[in-house]
Image: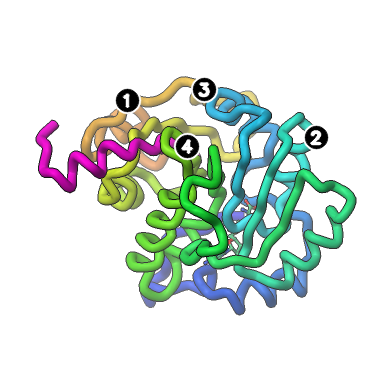
Amino acid sequence: MTMGTPSAGGVHAYGEPAYWDQRYRQDPGPFDWYQKYKTLAPILDIYLRRSHRLLVVGCGNSILGESMIADGYQDVVNIDISSVVVEAMQKKYQDIPQLKYIKMDVRDMNSFEDGSFDAIIDKGTLDSLMCGHDAQHSATKMLEEVGRVLKDKGVYILITYGDPNYRLHLLRDLHLWNIHMHVIDRMEKSSEQKTWELTRPLPLNEDGSSVAAVLGTNPEVHYIYVCTKDQSLRQNQNEGVEH
Ligand SMILES: C[S@@+](CC[C@H](N)C(=O)[O-])C[C@H]1O[C@@H](n2cnc3c(N)ncnc32)[C@H](O)[C@@H]1O
């Protein structure tokens, strides 16, 4: 299943909570967007530790959390705006205390204190917000909150269909991260066609054009932005320090 850029009207239901409630009522899943844990595990292994406190934003009915616990991760908190899916997941995983599900809007995570998590994983959730009403504002609120609840030197791992033209400026505008870019072949491709080495970062210049130069036009990939929080970048920005 793919989530493209919004149609001519500009707005798609993916940005609306009511859409997700209805969808999860009709189709309880499980279903993973874009990629499964198995294909992502090598890159998560590089940036995460099994002891990390992890947050999955917009978890849906994906089995990512379950797979991570099975692979040794010890503390995975999941949030989603849909009460339908959160209640179903709480019930499904009531016997796995390392896996928690909470109904919460990623744009307002005030029940989490600043610096609560070592890493935050987003597979398709910023993409959903970017399809909704007031996309830019929603996305900025989300990223501010992600930056707030992440520890300094923690990582925000964004798995998205959005190439640097559509995502990099949003991330960079926060002046909060050092960003590494990885790509992974879309799942629809057969394994013989594998093109990109997941664990090797691509060169990333200021506007992201270096990524397009390597990948060519219309690459069949998902982009993985690994954003390491560095509080000093914001301090320097506020103080007007030149780099
Ligand atoms: C494209 S799905 C991805 C689901 C899951 N991460 C996966 O990879 O299969 C986007 C998810 O984001 C959730 N979502 C949308 N807006 C949200 C918001 N403001 N706060 C929290 N979750 C939200 C939706 O309910 C949906 O479960």
Q: CA separation, marks 2 and 3?
A: 22 Å
Relative to residue 180, is residue 90 depicted above or below?
Answer: below
Label 2 crowding class (10 Å Cα cut-off): few <14, some 14-19, many 20+?
few
Mark before the other along the chain sequence, 2 or 4? 2
Q: CA separation, marks 3 and 1?
A: 13 Å
Residue 90 visible in image: yes
Q: How is the image coloured?
A: rainbow
Image quadrant holding the N terminus, namely bottom right
Q: CA separation, marks 4 and 3?
A: 16 Å
Residue 15 is a magenta residue = no
* Residue 75, position as x, y percentages in the image: 70, 41
Q: CA separation, marks 4 and 1?
A: 19 Å
Label 3's element? loop
Relative to residue 170, is residue 176 depicted above or below?
Answer: above
Residue type beneath disc 3: Thr
Residue type beneath disc 4: Val
Please, which residue is most extreme toward the front here? 113
Label 2's element? helix
Q: Which residue is mark 3?
A: 199
Label 4's element? strand
Residue type beneath disc 2: Ala
Label 1's element? loop
Q: Which residue is mark 4?
A: 155
Name the one closer to the observer, 215 or 129. 129
Residue 228 is a magenta residue = yes
Image quadrant holding the C terminus, namely top left
Mark before the other along the chain sequence, 4 or 1? 4
Residue 70 is marked as 2
